[in-house]
Amino acid sequence: MDIKKNIPNFLTLLNLLSGCIAIVMVADLKFDMAFYFVALGIFFDFFDGYFARKFNVSGPLGLQLDSLADMVTSGVVPGFVMFCMLSFGDFSTNYFLPYLGFVITLGACYRLANFNIDARQSDSFIGLPTPANTLFIVSLPLISNSIVASYLNNQWVLLGITAISAYVMNAEIPLFSLKIKDFSFHKYKLQMGFLIASITMVITLKFLAVPLIILTYVLLSILNTFFAKKVV
């Protein structure tokens, strides 16, 4: 048995296990633990691809396993979190509306299926990746800022976030690559500047930093594409 060949698939299954545990945490309304297990799953998701490339063992089985694991960690979990958030407040007496939170899950499913057949996304992304979208959604119940939290208690705001989330994952929005292959600031000034800003936000804003970082990434990508076209 070739151990190296199975390391990436084992990491993928750990991603799936993390997602399953995160679902249990959400069901118990332990959103902080759900966030940590989602983050752990995304960590495993990153390294399964890394080791698959390093050991040159990429194959169709790994591709299918990766998508199925991501469907749980980055598809079911954020939809379930939004369902729970919509189950409180103005819509708490409406049995059906909270289920609209699973529109996020549907959007993630379409995104993952499309990603597998889209050859344009080898080095950078088109549309927001499902792990980034998941971190955005699962961080929302953990935001302690009173002003922001008051908006997140408004179910119309949550429904708007749900719709935008499903759209942005599948929109034709080119996002700049986060890969830094050398330490040339001139070549990677956008990536390095974004990394420094992200670290600063995490230190100062805690969980509020997570959605802000994702929003900043999308907005910077849109601006980068716009100015690149202007130069051309």
Image (tube, rainbow, N blue to C red):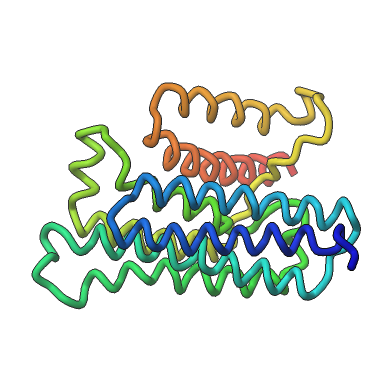
Say above or below: 58 vs 188: below
Front one among 49 and 228: 49
The residue at the far bottom in this view is: 96
Q: Position of residue 188 (x, y in %)?
A: 74, 30
Point 54% across, 69% down: residue? 71
- Residue sitting at the far front: 1
Q: Is residue 71 left or right of residue 9?
A: left
Quadrant where the C terminus is found in the figure: top right
Is residue 110 toward the left or the right of residue 95 in the image? right
For the point 36% across and 56% down, the residue is 25
Q: Quadrant of residue 151?
A: top left
Query: Closer to the camera, 89 or 24?
Result: 24
For this rendering, which residue is in front, 5 or 89?
5
| Depicted 231 relative to depicted 23: above or below | above
Image quarter of residue 62: bottom right
Number of numbered labels in the structure image? 0
The N terminus - image quarter = bottom right
Residue 37: % across, % down: 48, 50
Instruction: Tell me: 113 left or right of 33.
Output: right
- In the image, residue 154 sits, relative to residue 202, either above or below, namely below
Residue occupying image coordinates x 36% and y 65%:
80
